[in-house]
Image (cartoon, rainbow, N blue to C red):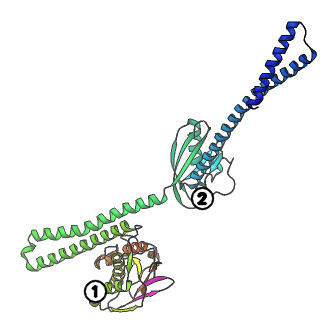
């Protein structure tokens, strides 16, 4: 009701009161005045009631608006939470107080190979993982966080680290599953790497010490013996130098990976330099080298890493070839990639060794590899250098007939 209407009613009420008061003074109240007073009194009472109702309605509207805002805020937070949980790399499972599934994000489903609706299903029925069920029962029972390691066989062999925690107030629990498979694999690789490096370093160092002690014990006085032992010491030093050089190369490749260090590189020039590096050893073993080097576009890459790739492939073909054998090197473009092939007529590689060929310190014939001066890191460097350039490396081999190594390096749009 507007201010003008309220003022008008107030004035009318005053007038009526005056009239009524005057009538009482003369001792009579006319019927019209009585009716007017009654109507205006009812209107005033109705106005007061409406005013109270309007105030109450305004208060209710404010309460409802605040409630709506809180509900909208809660729904927004819930959507944000669900989006975060769904986007996590870890698997997340939420249960009610009875151990039945309330929510499972896509990662949990993937880890355990689950499909279809899961809400309301007892956790024990999710892949029949009794260890998971036992941990969840403990969390729901004592209200404490628990942790276990779980080995999965299906859908894929995996090692999971599971952490459970109670949902205080909600009467349920949450379980987070972290896939530790890759981490454990890398840890094992690092452990094996340290052990292999220690062994590889210990062998030449022990030999050098033994030769030096022999010289100190009197062999130095024998010209022929001292010359022989000094020659062996020099060979072991060369072996150590090669090993340390390859270790530094691997470290550099791993440090460079993913950092975008790339410049235009002409692989044909790199290949010519690699051939020059191994030319002396080619002559020593009377090996015939044929190079089919076609015109190829430059690639975006690391020139030093690519040179080591080419040198190591050629060096590998020389080491494990027969005296008087042949080596074919082919460089060409195919399917928007530069392809390098190195083929030899060497001793070949057993089929059961092909999968491990690019592992660090893996040798098909350990005795022959060391005798040829190999560090066991050459093909690992080839693999790392190829990966650095987002390429692929593969090998074809037949025992006793030779091997073919093929590297594909993609040509970038900038080339």
**Which quarter of the rendering shows the N terminus?**
top right
Relative side of 144 to 49, left or right: left
> Badge 2: how crowded within 10 Å, few (<14), some, or many (20+)?
few
Q: Is residue 331 above or below residue 103?
A: below
Task: Determine the image quadrant of residue 366.
Answer: bottom left
Query: Where does label 1 land, which residue?
Result: 281
Separation of disc 2 and disc 1 at Cα?
53 Å
Q: Position of residue 48 (x, y in %)?
A: 77, 24
Residue 86 appears in the figure:
yes
Q: Is residue 64 above or below residue 306?
A: above
Q: Is residue 331 magenta?
A: yes
Q: Position of residue 125 (x, y in %)?
A: 65, 50
Q: Nearer the viewer, residue 410 or 133?
A: 410
Q: Is residue 210 above or below residue 99?
A: below
Query: Where does label 2 land, which residue?
Result: 110
Q: Is residue 64 magenta?
A: no
Relative side of 344 to 248, left or right: right
Relative side of 17 to 390, left or right: right
Residue 397 appears in the figure:
no
The residue range painted magenta reads: 329-340
Q: Residue drawn at (40%, 70%), measured in percent from left and top?
A: 359
Q: Nearer the viewer, residue 335 or 345?
A: 335
Q: Position of residue 369 (x, y in %)?
A: 32, 77
Overall secondary structure of the magenta stretch?
strand
Secondary structure under tag 2 reads: helix
């Amino acid at each position: 009701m507007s201010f003008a209407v309220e003022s008008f009613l107030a004035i009318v009420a005053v007038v009526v009161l005056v009239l009524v008061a005057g009538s009482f003074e003369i001792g009579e109240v006319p019927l019209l005045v009585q009716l007017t007073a009654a109507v205006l009194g009812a209107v005033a009472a109705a106005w007061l009631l409406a005013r109270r109702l309007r105030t109450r309605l305004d208060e209710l509207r404010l309460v409802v608006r605040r409630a709506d805002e809180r509900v909208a805020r809660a729904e927004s937070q819930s959507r944000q939470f669900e989006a975060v949980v769904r986007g996590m790399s870890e698997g997340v499972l939420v249960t009610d107080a009875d151990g039945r599934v309330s929510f499972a994000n896509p990662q949990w489903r993937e880890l355990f190979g689950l499909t279809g609706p899961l809400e309301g299903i007892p956790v024990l029925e999710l892949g029949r993982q009794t260890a998971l069920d036992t941990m969840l029962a403990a969390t729901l029972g004592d209200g404490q966080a628990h942790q276990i390691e779980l080995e999965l066989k299906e859908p894929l062999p995996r090692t999971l680290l599971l952490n459970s925690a109670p949902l205080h107030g909600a009467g349920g629990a949450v379980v987070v599953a972290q896939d530790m498979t890759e981490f454990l694999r890398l840890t094992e690789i690092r452990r094996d790497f340290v052990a292999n490096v220690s062994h590889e370093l210990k062998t030449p160092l022990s030999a050098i010490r033994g030769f030096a002690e022999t010289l100190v014990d009197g062999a130095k006085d024998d010209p022929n013996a001292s010359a022989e032992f000094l020659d062996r010491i020099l060979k072991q030093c060369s072996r150590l130098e090669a090993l340390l050089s390859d270790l530094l190369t691997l470290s550099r490749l791993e440090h460079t990976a993913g950092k975008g260090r790339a410049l235009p590189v002409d692989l044909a020039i790199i290949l010519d330099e690699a051939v020059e590096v191994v030319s002396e050893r080619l002559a020593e073993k009377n090996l015939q080298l044929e190079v089919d080097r076609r015109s190829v576009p430059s690639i975006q890459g690391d020139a030093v890493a690519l040179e080591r790739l080419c040198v190591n492939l050629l060096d590998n073909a020389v080491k494990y070839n027969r005296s008087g054998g042949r080596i074919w090197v082919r460089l060409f473009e195919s399917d928007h990639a530069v392809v390098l092939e190195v083929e030899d007529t060497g001793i070949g590689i057993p089929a059961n060794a092909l999968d491990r060929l690019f592992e660090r310190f893996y040798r098909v014939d350990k005795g022959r590899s060391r005798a040829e001066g190999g560090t066991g890191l050459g093909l690992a460097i080839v693999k790392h250098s190829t990966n650095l350039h987002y390429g692929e490396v593969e090998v074809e081999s037949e025992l006793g007939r030779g091997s073919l190594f093929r590297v594909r390096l993609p040509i970038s749009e900038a080339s």
